[in-house]
Image (cartoon, helix red, strand yellow):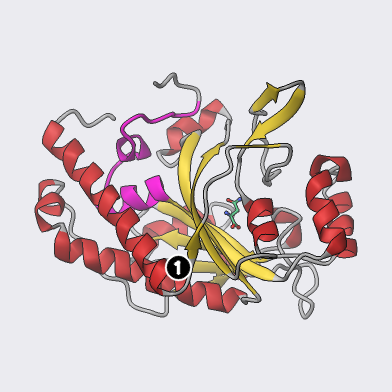
Amino acid sequence: MKIKEPRKIRAILKIQSEMRKILAEHLRKKGFIEISPVILSPMTDPLNHPTMPGDVTCYGKQYHLTQSMIFHKQIAMKFLEKIFIFSPNIRIEHPDRKKTGRHLFEFTQLDLEVRGASREDMMNLCEELITDVIATIKRDCKTELDLLARRLKIPKKPFKQIHYEDAYKKYGKNFETMISKTHDGPVWIIDIPLKSREFYDREDPEKPGFLRDMDLIYPEGYGEALSGGEREYDYERIKTRIHKKGQKLSQFKEYMQVAKDDLPPSAGFGIGIERLTRFICGLKSIEDASLFPKVPGKYGI
Ligand code: ASN
């Protein structure tokens, strides 16, 4: 942590611990089941931007450290209807990303998935979840928030929505930063073009070339909060999308075997716990949202 005052460090960690409790209780009440994280797997999220591989050999076989549990979430839908995981992710990002104040190469996301859900179902759920966390922390962690000089506003539902293309036209290529700096409530970006996302996001049958997905942007300059959407579940369509990305089917062999047999339709999202902590506590850098931060390009314990 950059912050050195033990009282402030304690306040941040207390708020983070409360946040996890509120999030988990909210989801359990809605019928979600918590499953354990997967740390190693022969397949992981290819992401839509380059990262360095985090590979480990076990018993002569190669495993990847989890970049996101997307494939495991989809496979879990065969057995469970609503799931969540506090999922540790390793993404070995370009060292330049140390300057963003938003990137850690080890972080936790609250990843969730719902069988048969639509993007709009997930956006509603997310709005309820986020307003619940903010309102409860504001009520129960007054001392900690005062110590951090953070004045939290409870966002109004529904959150504002902007189509990706309109955002691009209005704010240019740094639209996320611009939207974040110029709004005082969270903003959804919807209908992201196919080429800007991973192969597993479902293409909108009514708007070819665009996806049934969404990003959420925090206000006050805190940047991206989460991404998610409806998933592709049809074997042939998944195959086409992997080829379009120039990726190899063999990278996702075990996932493709399940998809060939039966992958239920689902939707979900993943919300970064350290980013949410940064936003709720009003922290300058994400480095202060973890006791043992791993900042790209920097050494950490
Ligand atoms: N967790 C995200 C999702 O559910 C995926 C990601 O983190 N790349 O869509």
Q: Residue at x 83, y 67 (%)?
A: 234
Residue at screen point 47% across, 77% down: 124
Q: Is residue 168 visible?
A: no
Q: Which of the 4 quarters of the picture holds residue 300?
A: top left
In the rendered image, the vertical position of residue 128 relative to residue 286, given as above or below: below
User: Which image quarter: residue 238?
Assistant: bottom right
Please name the residue that numbered disc 1 is placed on.
187
Q: Is residue 285 magenta?
A: yes
Amino acid beneath label 1: Val
Decide if residue 28 is in sight here: yes
SS under mark 1: strand
Disc 1 crowd, CA 10 A, few/some/many (<14, 14-19, 20+)? many
Q: Position of residue 160 (x, y in %)?
A: 45, 75
Q: How many marks?
A: 1
Q: Which residues are magenta?
A: 273-296
Question: On the rendered structure, is 225 left or right of 166?
Answer: left
Residue 103's place in the image compared with 144, above or below, is above
Looking at the picture, does residue 13 appear above or below residue 221?
above
